[in-house]
Image: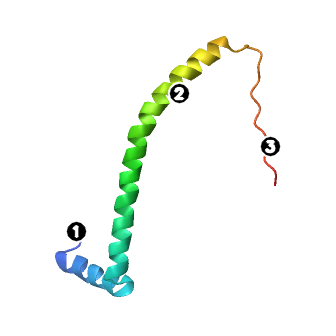
Amino acid sequence: MGSFSIWHWLIVLLIVVMVFGTKKLKNMGSDLGGAVKGFKDGMRDGGAAADDKTAGQVANATAADKNTIDVEAKSKS
């Protein structure tokens, strides 16, 4: 009852290719790669922007009145 052998994985791969087709699998692979690249770029850019934003929020928080209450605006249904 160990892991699947190479033959099990080849059969699964063959079934997946038969169901989806090679063109659709290629498109899904490139879409997934683009999404991962976009996520990495966003994390890199977001980290630098978050540091700048945090510094600005600290300066604004010290200058703000302590009795101010933040209220969320209700969205229209």
Residue sitting at 40 percent across and 57 percent down?
35
Determine the image quadrant of residue 25. Answer: bottom left
Which amino acid does the dot numbered 3 rest on?
Answer: Lys
In this rendered view, identify the residue nearer to me: 63 or 6. Answer: 63
Q: Which mark is residue 55?
A: none
Three-letter amino acid code of the residue under disc 2: Lys
Q: Quadrant of residue 26?
A: bottom left
Point 52% across, 24% down: residue: 54
> Which residue corresponds to mark 2?
53
42 to the left or right of 3: right
Closer-to-camera residue (41/70): 41
Residues packed near mark 2 inside 10 Å, few (<14), some (14 to 19) or many (20 plus): few
Disc 3 from disc 1: Cα separation: 55 Å
Q: Which residue is mark 1?
A: 2
Question: Considering only order in the chain, which callout, 1 or 3, is on the residue closer to the N terminus?
Answer: 1
Residue 70: x %, y % from top left: 74, 28
Instruction: Inspect the image, locate mark 1, and give the three-letter code of the amino acid beneath it.
Output: Gly
Residue projecting furthest to the left? 6
Nearer to us: label 2 or label 3: 2
For label 3, the residue is: 74
Comparing 26 with 12, the one in front is 26
Q: Residue furthest bottom?
A: 18
Q: Is residue 43 above or below residue 12?
A: above
Q: CA distance from mark 2 to mark 3?
A: 25 Å
Element at label 3: loop
Residue occupying the point 38% across, 82% down: 20
Q: Is residue 37 left or right of residue 3?
A: right
Q: CA distance from mark 2 to mark 1?
A: 51 Å
Label 3: few (<14), some (14–19) or many (≥20) C-alpha neighbours in 10 Å: few
Q: Vertical placement of 37 versus 47: above or below? A: below
